[in-house]
Amino acid sequence: MAKQYKVSIRVISQKGTCEVGHRTGDEWIIENETPAGLCPFAFHNIYPLVTPLMFGGSFPWEADPDATTAACPDAENPVVFELRRLHD
């Protein structure tokens, strides 16, 4: 079985009014459950990018193989997240 890593989700940018109240600097760690307090719509958008990071994958367009960015689906009030694989 592949090694499973924890992944941090950190708000790196927030413009307009986030309906959930996310602000730059908010952070969560994903292990086996959806993190409490994280907007479910944002989580739905970013989860497809979390999964590869959890199992050792990377994205060829990113300079850092341990990180990528993703945004919530609200284009008028965007929240941008950095997703980062954590090494024990």
Image (cartoon, helix red, strand yellow):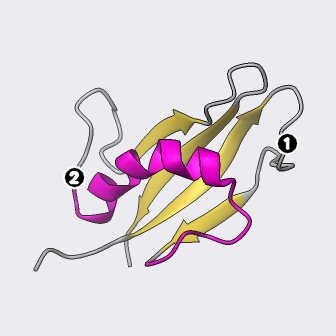
Q: Where is residue 35 in the image (x, y as percent from the top left)?
A: 61, 70
Which residue is tagged 1? 19
Q: Which of 88 and 35 is in front in this view?
A: 35
Query: Which amino acid is tagged 1?
Result: Glu
Identified at 24% across, 64% down, the residue is: 55
Q: Is residue 24 above or below residue 54?
A: above
Percent from the top left, x then y, of residue 81? 60, 42
Q: Is residue 86 magenta?
A: no
Q: Is residue 40 magenta?
A: yes
Is 47 positioned to the left or the right of 38 in the image? Answer: left
Q: Give the range drawn in magenta.
A: 32-56
62 to 30, vertically: above or below? above
Q: 1 or 34, which lies in front?
A: 34
Coordinates of residue 38 in the picture (x, y in percent): 68, 59
| Residue pointed to by mark 2 | 57
Q: Is residue 39 left or right of residue 46?
A: right
Q: Tell me if 51 is positioned left or right of 74 in this view.
A: left
Task: Give me the residue at 89% from left, 33% from top.
Answer: 17
